[in-house]
Image (cartoon, helix red, strand yellow):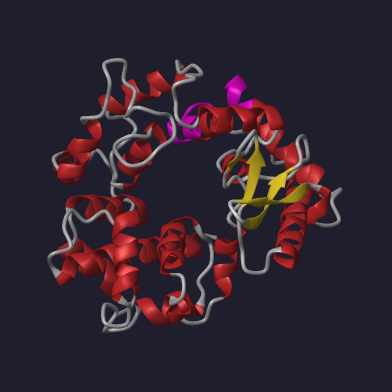
Amino acid sequence: MNKEQIIDFLLENASANIKYRVKRDILQEPIDSIEMQNLQEQILELPKIKKTFATQKENGFLGNELHGGYFNGFDTNFSYLLRNGVEISNPNLQRAKQALLNWKYNEDDYYFPGGKAMDEHGPGGIKAMIADMMLNFKCDENTPHIQEYIEISLNNFKGALNHNNINDFTKECTYKGRKVRYYIKGAAFPSAFHLNILNKTTSWRTTENVRMFEKSYKHCEKIINEAMPDGGTIFVNCGHLVGPFNINWKEHQRKEVISINEFIDNPIDFAWWMRSLPGKRIVDRALTDWIFKDDVLSATPEIYLKKYTFLWAIEPSWRKQKSKLCDLYFPAIINLHNVELV
């Protein structure tokens, strides 16, 4: 199998959501074509898509909490719909967008204490999450809330250049019998939200800022990899520890793996690696050696597949081997396409 053969396989065997994404994101098929409109209608009839929209409240809110699991958290429901190819122009997603813009702090929200603490600490929790989702809703990046978090994101990357090691911005403590780290209040260090927000915006990209960002990213990566070579979580201490809020540096390190079987001791890492592929701009040996095999399924341990289908798969059913293959091929082929665009 090569890239073109995988695309042909997906177009022939995948469900409507994957076919739509391949045609839109790789083959650049106009979304207003009759074929694409028909596929969009089929996507909206998929059982989990209908179940996700069934969580929508009268005011447009998707689920019960801003941050939570499938069919409960607004952020997860929104991400799932986008991943399946539901267009932002969908009337129900437009209602959801308005609900997000009207959202107010809710102390009954399970994640309220942690998110509020992150906002107060400086890196940004609930408010940063909202800014990130606003960008996914295609809100104008000159919107004041987004501009505020572009500035906060830049300041955290800039401030991180003042740190020499992990002790400059975190402290160690014992939590539930194990040693963990948490951020020092007010210390600058980029979170995943800061990285996402800067990746999705352009207004900040002066020559000076881009150079600072690139220098800081490498500096932060060096500090984390020296202090936490096997990865790990940095928490926030707000009466109890909450997290993770750091960039998943362990996931970034996965660009160094040279065999898919290196995930054997931590199969959930395989699922997170697969999840991250569409947004990555790298092709490593682990990906190409594995995905182009004729026996991809037999080369993938069953425990990997179980973790992946739980976290990230979008085929409606895995009863057929071809459906499993479609779900494995899809993120890989998006990654390979993205790399060619660089």
Percent position of residue 232, x then y:
61, 59
Q: Quadrant of residue 333?
A: bottom left
Q: Quadrant of residue 59?
A: top left
Quadrant in which the N terminus appears? bottom left
Name above or below for residue 157 compared with residue 256: above
Percent position of residue 68, x then y:
40, 37
Name above or below for residue 12 compared with residue 244: below
> What residue is drawn where x is 21% and y is 40%?
49
Percent position of residue 275, x then y:
42, 58
Residue positioned most to the front: 177
Q: Indicate left or right for 179 with 49 as reference.
A: right
> What residue is drawn where x is 29% and y is 37%?
71
> What residue is drawn where x is 36% and y is 52%?
25
> What residue is drawn where x is 58% and y is 75%?
256
Region in magenta: 133-147
Name above or below for residue 326 compared with residue 262: above
Quadrant in which the C terminus appears? bottom right
Residue nearest the observer in this picture, 17 or 52: 52
Q: Indicate left or right for 288 with 312 as reference.
A: right
Residue nearest the observer in this picture, 304 or 287: 304
Asked whether the viewer can see residue 167, the reply is yes
Q: Please say whether residue 219 is one of the residues in the magenta stretch.
A: no
Q: Indicate left or right for 319 with 325 as reference.
A: left
Total number of numbered discs in the rendering: 0
Asked whether the viewer can see residue 142, the reply is no
Percent position of residue 319, x then y:
13, 65
Q: Quadrant of residue 58?
A: top left
